[in-house]
Image (cartoon, coloured by chain):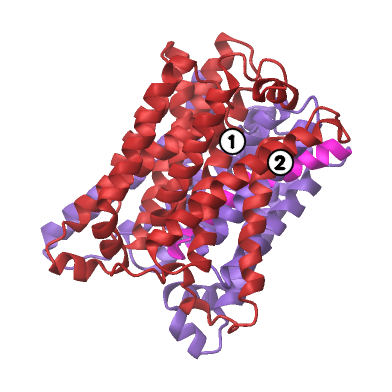
Chain colours: A purple, B red
Amino acid sequence: MFSGLMLNTWIAATAVAVIAGVTGFFAVLRGQTFAAHAIPNGAFAGAAGATLLGLNPFAGLAIFSVAGALGIAGLSRRSRPDVATALTFVMMLGVGALFVSWSTEYAQEAYSLLFGEVFGVSQGEVLPIVVLGVVSIAAIIVMFRPLMLSSAMPEVAEARGVSTRRMELAFLLVMALATSMTVPVVGALLMFSLMIGPAAAARSLTARPVLAMALSVAIALVTVWVGIAFSYRSNWPLGFFVGIMGAGFFLLSRAYAAIARSARGLQAPPAA
Amino acid sequence: MTVGHLFRYVFEPGFFASGPVHVALAVGTVIAITSAVVGVFTVTRGQSFAGHSLADIATTGGAGAFLIGLNQFWGYLAFGVGAAAFMEMIGVQRRRGRDVATGVVLGAGLGLAALFLYLGTQNSSTTGASFTILFGSMFVITSSTVPVLITSALLALATVLVLARVLLLSSLSPDIAAARGVPVRAVGAAYLMALAVSVALSAVIIGAVLSTALLIGPAATALRVTKGPVRAMAVAAGIGVVATWLGIVLAYDSFYWPPAGRGWPVSFFVVTLIVGGYLVTYLRRGDRREAAAEALDEEQVCSPA
């Protein structure tokens, strides 16, 4: 389970879990869960287009995820964010449907993009993922304070000269960056589950931002590691274990938060 | 040339193998209208994500039903309604909490989708199975389910229309609604169920992508250009139907277009038309204020009175 090719899987999955834990925390905090779903899934259309043109799927993923981030941020200026996200998303998928209809041999590859090929990670794929993970986490650390402020208290942030709109765009771009590299490895669906479940669980356990972010990463790591072990043994898809465990952690921490609240009789941190 | 002939040219052979095309077309129109009307409330309540997630999860149910040999329609419906109940259960009433609850349920649903598709490909070697999740398997329903389908659509529509007044009030200002004795949470739950049924229906027929497009696009466009919920519903239904039909006609025209020479997908045209229509409203309002971030709820202008 820990030898040869599997070692790549462990390293890549660990990097992905850290990225997902950090970006997911902000996605949940900012109420941008829909964007976290739309960008990875919509980017898949880009991979379809790139395959069609004979390009590297990474290029297509990167272009489409950035386009998705720009579309969501752009439309959000004068629409409700969820409507903006929904329309950007369906547009990307519509284009994806077009690309898929043009190509003849895409179906198998599409499956791996949606659900990932986590057990087939090659040595060459590990390095870009780790580098990308470091870059996107560095980006988040650099803008941690303004991002935090504009996520939690947009009005205060504006008053202090932090542009909400610019922060949103920056965050969506980091998400797009993280997505374009992780999707081929873990798949669009798993990336989403991994961003939301652990972060939502962490948020209902504590209101302290740094602690919540650390918890989110920790839960994401546990989810992925246990998931890989189960998946390796049972041969069932990793996405299944991650999805179910993400929801499970969320329910457990909600229950824990409720019990702790009633035990202390205090006003507990707001459950996400 | 009958409508049936026309469509056999538009879509690949076998696409429609399971039922008369004109029935499917009629059902498509019903779906467009139902989605548009339900969508007006979805947009007003800020539940686009829930609407999309329910479609995704419903398709998962279809895969599950296929696996155990049931009629897929019941799988769609069961998963859609079940997911809606689950979201309602764990979702707090605040908008942000609802978003997260939706995300968590969707994550679990997609996990199940991965499992069902994996098990499905173990049994048969259909590699295209994953597409049902995103693009739906258009017109896979047998004609025997069509009456059930239309009945459920009408049921969802009726629920929403009956609830319309209280729903609007409790969407726009929950506090006033509660003060007036409206059971806000129960109304919200009933609405979510209706949304689940309508979305599951459209997902089974036109796929999750188009389902979301028809639910959100026409309603959001209508809410931008009209005042008042009734007019918005009518305009949204009109936009939905026109986009659907135009999309089908364009798909027919595209039969000899490059590069593949076998038609472009209907979903691409319908989505493009809908998103394009929405963007046109931007032009119309372009001369107005540069939209100070939050105050932009043009979509919320419809008042319950």
* Quadrant of the frame with the C terminus of chain A: bottom left
Front residue of this view, candidates A215 and B241: B241
Residue for point 65% across, 63% down: B279
Q: Which mark is residue A96?
A: 2
Q: Amino acid at mark 2?
A: Gly
The residue segment tinted magenta is: A26-53
Subunit of mark 2? Answer: A
Would residue A241 be visible to someone looking at this image? no
Describe the element under mark 1 as helix, strand or loop.
Answer: helix
Image side of residue B110 versus residue A125, left or right? left
Q: Position of residue B186 (x, y in %)?
A: 20, 50
Magenta span includes A121: no
Describe the element under mark 2 as helix, strand or loop.
Answer: helix
Q: Which residue is denoted by mark 1 in the rendering?
A: B134
Q: Position of residue B267 (x, y in %)?
A: 65, 39
Label 2 near label 1: C-beta < 8 Å? yes
Whether labels 1 and 2 belong to a single chain: the reply is no
Residue for point 82% across, 42% down: A50
Image side of residue B228 versus residue A122, left or right? left
Residue for point 60% across, 27% down: B130
Please tell me in which quadrant of the rendered image residue B13 appears: top right
Q: Amino acid at mark 1?
A: Leu
Please tell me in which quadrant of the rendered image residue B136 appears: top right
Residue for point 71% across, 58% down: A66
